[in-house]
Amino acid sequence: LYYFSEVWRAFDLDENKYVACKIHHVNKEWKEDKKANYVKHAMREKDIHKTLDHPRIVRLFDVFIIDNHSFCTVLEYCDGNDLDFYLKQNKQIPEKEARSIIMQVVSALRYLSEKKPPVIHYDLKPANILLQSGTTSGAIKITDFGLSKIMEDADEGSIELTSQGAGTYWYLPPETFVVGCDPPKISSKVDVWSVGVIFYQCLYGRRPFGHEQTQQKILEENTILKATEVTFPAKPVVSSVAQDFIRRCLQYRKEERADIFELSKHELFRPRGTKALPPSSPSARSVRSEDTDF
């Protein structure tokens, strides 16, 4: 075990509100330089996460060292469970509710892509999507920016992946598994792929690639590197619009995959019989609550 964490609910006397305190325990057998490097990584996460202010992203308020083996991150407190817990209990989600969840996730990712410099979450998965009401019909918040990346040279459109092997393999795209002399190039389209996998899992109750496999098996058998095309079960019945959205997310070649701005304009998110509205349009702000993220 490298490290583990536990989350406690605490009360902020200055702000007069509850917060979540995530206490990270580092392996005591690590050498001091390895511990220092881990803490440095955590501080980097804080620097990224603390600048984020969006209704669909959990706020990070502070990070502080407890002792040589542990530190604490102070986060916005959210009631309810995460999407992973919900899926384990219910397996599938009706398309309308799944659409609402994905719309909110895409809204948060669009915000990350609009930042200067842009931010890649890199570890999007159901366990990192909090359901504030504990149900799939309410608001969500994205959490855990421990593997997030900053695209410091945004003009390049991609950055080198320096943490290959990290992340949750079922939700990562093929380009993150490429092995070569140089690190693979990645972009925010990593998160787009993850969105497609999550939406598919919500609708069909299983992941599209490697569902029955362990992380180790996915690596050994190059499962994601072979994931050239997504297929859809006959049941449950899912709209062609939702399937098209998933296909656009799960394009094998990242050059052919939709970017987050294209996704946000997809037909999936339009009320029936209407055209896409510009984000700043008053009409766009007045649509029903489940559509207010755009």
Image (cartoon, rainbow, N blue to C red):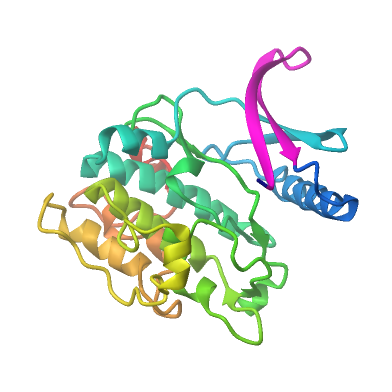
146 and 28: which one is in front? 28
User: Does residue 203 appear to the left or right of 162 in the view shown?
Assistant: left
Determine which quarter of the picture holds residue 70: top right
- Relative vertical location of residue 174 with respect to residue 99 in this rendering, above or below: below
- Magenta residues span 2-26
Q: Quadrant of residue 244?
A: bottom left
Furthest-bottom residue in view? 181
Depth order, front residue of 143/39? 39
Task: Please give the name of the residue rendered at 70% of the width and 12% of the height, measured from the top-left corner.
Answer: 16
Residue at 86% across / 52% down in the picture? 31
Residue 260 highlighted magenta (yes or no)? no
How many marks the image carries: the answer is 0
State the residue in front, 192 or 52: 192
Q: Is residue 137 above or below residue 124?
A: above
Give the percent coordinates (x, y) of residue 84: 40, 39
Answer with the quarter of the image where residue 133 lies: top left
Quadrant of the snapshot with the N terminus: top right
The answer to whether any part of residue 285 appears in the image is: yes
Say left or right for 58 vs 60: left
Q: Position of residue 86 (x, y in %)?
A: 35, 33
Residue in the foreground of this view, choosing between 139 and 251: 251
**Percent coordinates x, y for residue 146 in the rendering:** 65, 49
Q: Is residue 13 magenta?
A: yes
**Residue at the far front in the pictured view:** 29
Instruction: Give how far across and how far down residue 219 sits, in percent.
Output: 47, 69
Residue 288 appearing in the image: no
222 relative to 201 in the view: left or right: right
Q: Is residue 108 left or right of residue 70?
A: left
Residue at 25% over, 47% down:
205
Magenta stretch: helix, strand or loop mostly: strand
